[in-house]
Amino acid sequence: MKDEIQESIIDEFSIFDDWLDKYDYLISLSESLPAIDPAKRNDTYLIEGCQSRVWVAAELRDGKVYYTADSDAIITKGIVALLIRVMNGRKAAEAANIDLYFIDAIGLGENLSPTRSNGLRAMIQQMKLYALVFSKQNNN
């Protein structure tokens, strides 16, 4: 099933011919990242397995998951901004099980270094885990 937000991201990235331009776009997206509470920039919210330091927090409001994040690496901030754009505001069960097909469609996975790819998987895993826990608590 097509997802409107992911299709929009695929369209945005399709205008760029090479990955240097796509990296520049990722960097610009980092500015749209919802700010994490500075008190949550600690080891509890730190994503294990990332080359850079990435913090992701989530909360459940009205049955929907909302994420905030930060990173000390600008490209990683852009990547997590994309993930949040796709996953934010969804019902917890939906966020826990979402197929993030845009990653392959824009070529992100194949154009990251192995350590960044591991970090991407770790971010996705943690974000889905938050949603799964919320869905079990909320039974949605």
Image: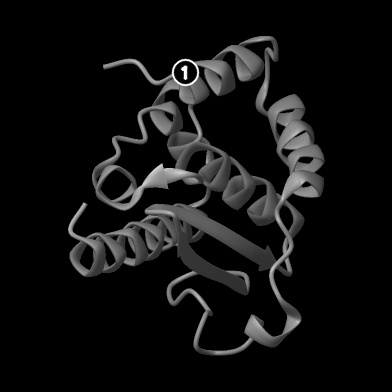
Q: Which colouring convention does the figure follow? A: one colour
Q: Secondary structure at mark 1?
A: helix
Quadrant position of residue 22: top right
Quadrant position of residue 60: bottom left
Tell me the quarter of the image containing the N terminus: top left
Question: Can the viewer see residue 106?
Answer: no
Q: Which residue is mark 1?
A: 4
Place of residue 92 in the rendered image (x, y in percent of width and height, measured from the top left): 32, 52
Q: Amino acid at mark 1?
A: Glu
Place of residue 110 in the rendered image (x, y in percent of width and height, measured from the top left): 44, 35
In this view, the residue in front, 111 or 59, is 59
Place of residue 130 in the rendered image (x, y in percent of width and height, measured from the top left): 36, 66
In this view, the residue in front, 139 or 17, is 139
Q: Residue at x 81, y 39 (%)?
A: 28
Q: Residue at x 30, y 39 (%)?
A: 98
Q: Is residue 117 left or right of residue 131?
A: right
Question: Can the viewer see residue 60?
Answer: yes
Q: Residue at x 52, y 50 (%)?
A: 113
Q: Residue at x 47, y 18 (%)?
A: 4
Above or below, 14 against 26 in this view is above
Q: Is residue 115 left or right of residue 128?
A: right
In this view, the residue in front, 28 or 113, is 28
